[in-house]
Image: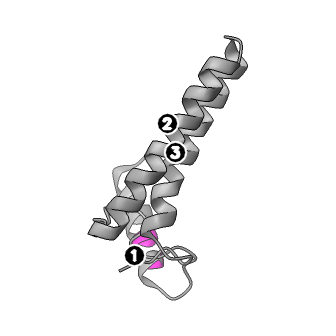
Amino acid sequence: MDENTGQEKLNKATEYLKSDRRSMHISTFEYLKPNDEQLKQMEEARQRAFVYANAMEALLPDGPDKTYLLRKFREVAMWANICISCNVDGSPRT
């Protein structure tokens, strides 16, 4: 890929994100520092996810499906943090 073409695409994407046409909030890929209440909620969500994951680990037979389930559940647990820290439109909860 031509370096100028890559930069042009990046510029176009940046321009789009700053426009009113975008479907994602501008902070979608930024670090959003959680406040103290959100940190407490995240900790509780992690603890509950840990209990569930350990129950599945003990219950299910080893194999690729178990591995897949545990990896997907880890992903779901991470999405819980986003749910706690972001509004529906992706803007930061304050």
> Measured along the vertical axis of the image, is residue 22 above or below residue 62?
below
Residue 91, position in %: x, y? 44, 78
Q: Residue at x 33, y 69 (%)?
A: 37
Q: Which residue in the rendered view is the most extreme toward the top?
A: 62
Q: Residue at x 49, y 73 (%)?
A: 90
The kind of residue tagged 3 is Arg
Q: Nearer the viewer, mark 2 or mark 1?
A: 2
Q: Give the structural element (helix, strand or loop) at label 3.
A: helix
Dot 1, how many residues are within 10 Å of its Cα: few (below 14), some (14-19), or many (20+)? Answer: some
The kind of residue tagged 1 is Pro
- Residue 53 position by quadrant: top right
Where the N terminus falls, by quadrant? top left
Mark 2 in CB contact with mark 1 (< 8 angstroms): no
Where the C terminus falls, by quadrant? bottom left
Sequence-wise first label, 3 or 1: 3
Mark 2 in CB contact with mark 3 (< 8 angstroms): yes
Q: Which residues are magenta?
A: 12-16
Q: Quickly name the residue at label 2.
A: 50
Q: Residue at x 44, y 46 (%)?
A: 46
Q: Quickly name the residue at label 1.
A: 92
Q: Which mark is residue 74?
A: none
Dot 3, how many residues are within 10 Å of its Cα: few (below 14), some (14-19), or many (20+)? Answer: few
